[in-house]
Amino acid sequence: MDMNTHTTLHFSPINSLLPQLAITFFSGYCAGILSAVTTQPMDNLVSLTMLSSNRRKSFAEISSEAGFQTLRLRGLGSRIFMIGTLTGVQWWIYDSFRNIVGFGPSSIIV
């Protein structure tokens, strides 16, 4: 096999704006999911510190009482829906604005 032979992927450009904006929304939604999953435990921990029974406790005490599974999973579904949708819509608005101004939608680089 020749070491100079490269396999390249050729994708046809997306000529229609609607599929490009759908890809943009989906990409933003995926970024929102990653953000929600990453920040969920700390957000739950901060929320638990607001309870009157936890006012004088440290983060370590609260997290050991609640357990990592509770911190990680409580409210995660609704948070994914909220943050994923919000981020997807923000990315969609950004790409729509780029198109309206004349820059065109963001490119997909492969």
Image (tube, rainbow, N blue to C red):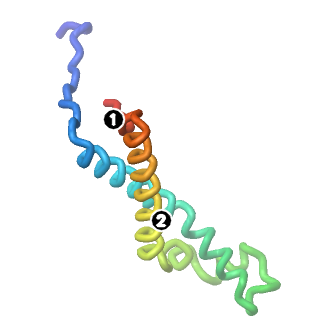
In which quadrant is the C terminus drawn? Answer: top left
- Tag 1: residue type? Ile
The residue at which mark 2 appears reads as: 83
The residue at which mark 1 appears reads as: 108
Residue 106 drawn at (x, y percent): 38, 37
Cα separation, mark 2 vs mark 1, equals 23 Å
The residue sitting at 73% across, 74% down in the picture is 59
The numbered mark, 2 or 1, whose residue comes first in the sequence reads 2
The residue sitting at 48% across, 78% down in the picture is 75
Figure check: 58 above or below 97: below
Q: Nearer the viewer, residue 97 or 62?
A: 97
Figure check: 85 above or below 16: below
The residue sitting at 48% across, 63% down in the picture is 37
Mark 2 is surrounded, within 10 Å at the Cα level, by few (under 14), some (14 to 19) or many (20 or more) other residues, namely many
The dot on residue 67 is none
Q: Say whether residue 4 is left or right of residue 25.
A: left
- Which residue is outermost to the right? 56
Q: What secondary structure is marked by label 1?
A: loop
